[in-house]
Amino acid sequence: MKKEQRTGIIIAAHGRHYLADAQGTRLQCVTRGKKTNVAVGDVVDLTLTSPDQAVIDKIRDRQTLLYRSDQYKSKLLAANVTQLFIVVATEPSFSDDLVSRALVAAEAAGIAARLILNKVDVEEGLEKARERLKVYTAMGYPVHEVSAKGRPEQTVDELAPLLAQQSTILIGQSGMGKSSLINLLVPDADIATREISAALDTGKHTTTFTRLYHLDAHASVIDSPGFQEFGLYHLSEGMLERAFRDFQPYLGGCKFYNCRHLSEPQCAVLDAVRAGHIAKMRHELYGQLLHESAQTLY
Ligand SMILES: Nc1nc2c(ncn2[C@@H]2O[C@H](COP(=O)(O)OP(=O)(O)OP(=O)(O)O)[C@@H](O)[C@H]2O)c(=O)[nH]1
Ligand SMILES: [Zn+2]
């Protein structure tokens, strides 16, 4: 009997187990051998092994790939994403380090990024959060003020149009309200999640896997579990300086063509930091990332 071939999109990943959607049919998938290079959002060629199971034969060429990495391994976050929403909130306080790392990852992957400031109904933290977000607005990243719990209708009115024709990944630290936003933007997200975790047999760990929801034929939303660290070891020095959007006007203006913008004389980037055109916090992160990516294993 000839084995049936399908094309699908990976909608969830848990360890080496994947769930694909093939024209509405859910298929539990495994890779051949020990490969773990499949990401949520990947378009894959499949061979059916039973009516609801398949083997992944091939990953189609990706438009984009978002990932993080440390010295030991890289972790694929999502494939074929067109934009990143970074969810922050008035409270608890968000981390500039994580926001900036996510922005650098997006730039390096060629993905548009927006910041979503949630919980603007919490007035105590609002002015401080707005103040802290100015550095990102100044770089050209849009900031959208919403309140998933306080003003759900306006929140949908603000964000839903941005999702059309896009594959959007939401990331955020724990407690920022990412789940609340997903539930507003994706009808029946909780039901879909239960189905997915049953199919993947993830047991109790229902919130620890990345999953993709189709909004319609041309739009999808990816929910990625809260991240605590965001290593970018895979970015070379050249990629790093270009992934800092605020550095771009100054690149090429340094005295030395191979300037690393750390302590060199007549460095246009350092001059811009001193003049206040580049935030100190951003330059410090750049130095930190350069340091991290220079770590080698022995
Ligand atoms: N005041 C206020 N609280 C909110 C808002 N959105 C979410 N919350 C609350 O913030 C808390 C965290 O919300 P979640 O949606 O679970 O946040 P999360 O980012 O998914 O967090 P994890 O599940 O830990 O990753 C919950 O108690 C929500 O009720 C909002 O717009 N305003
Ligand atoms: Zn320089």
Image (cartoon, rainbow, N blue to C red):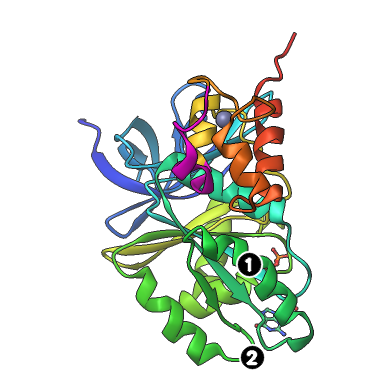
Of the two numbered discs 2 and 1 on the same chain, state the one appearing first in sequence: 1
Can residue 66 be seen in this snapshot? no
Regarding mark 2 in the picture, which secondary structure is present there? loop
Regarding mark 1 in the picture, which secondary structure is present there? helix
Quarter containing the N terminus: top left
- The relative height of residue 238 versus residue 48 in the rendered view (above or below) is above
Instruction: Give the percent coordinates (x, y) of residue 153.
Output: 49, 91
Residue hosting label 1: 133
Residue hosting label 2: 150
Q: Are marks 2 and 1 in contact (CB under 8 Å)?
A: no
Residue situated in front as seen by the camera: 173 or 12? 173
Task: Kindly identify the residue that appears in the image at 50 percent across and 67 percent down.
Answer: 192
Q: Classify mark 2 as within 8 Å of ligand 1 or not, answering yes or no.
A: yes
Instruction: Give the percent coordinates (x, y) of residue 242.
Output: 47, 37
Q: Look at label 2 and name its amino acid.
A: Gly
Q: Residues within 10 Å of mark 1 (few under 14, many from 20)?
A: some
- The segment highlighted magenta reads 244-255
**Pair 2/1: label in front:** 1
- The relative height of residue 12 versus residue 44 in the rendered view (above or below) is below
**247 falls in the magenta region:** yes
Quarter containing the C terminus: top right
**60 falls in the magenta region:** no
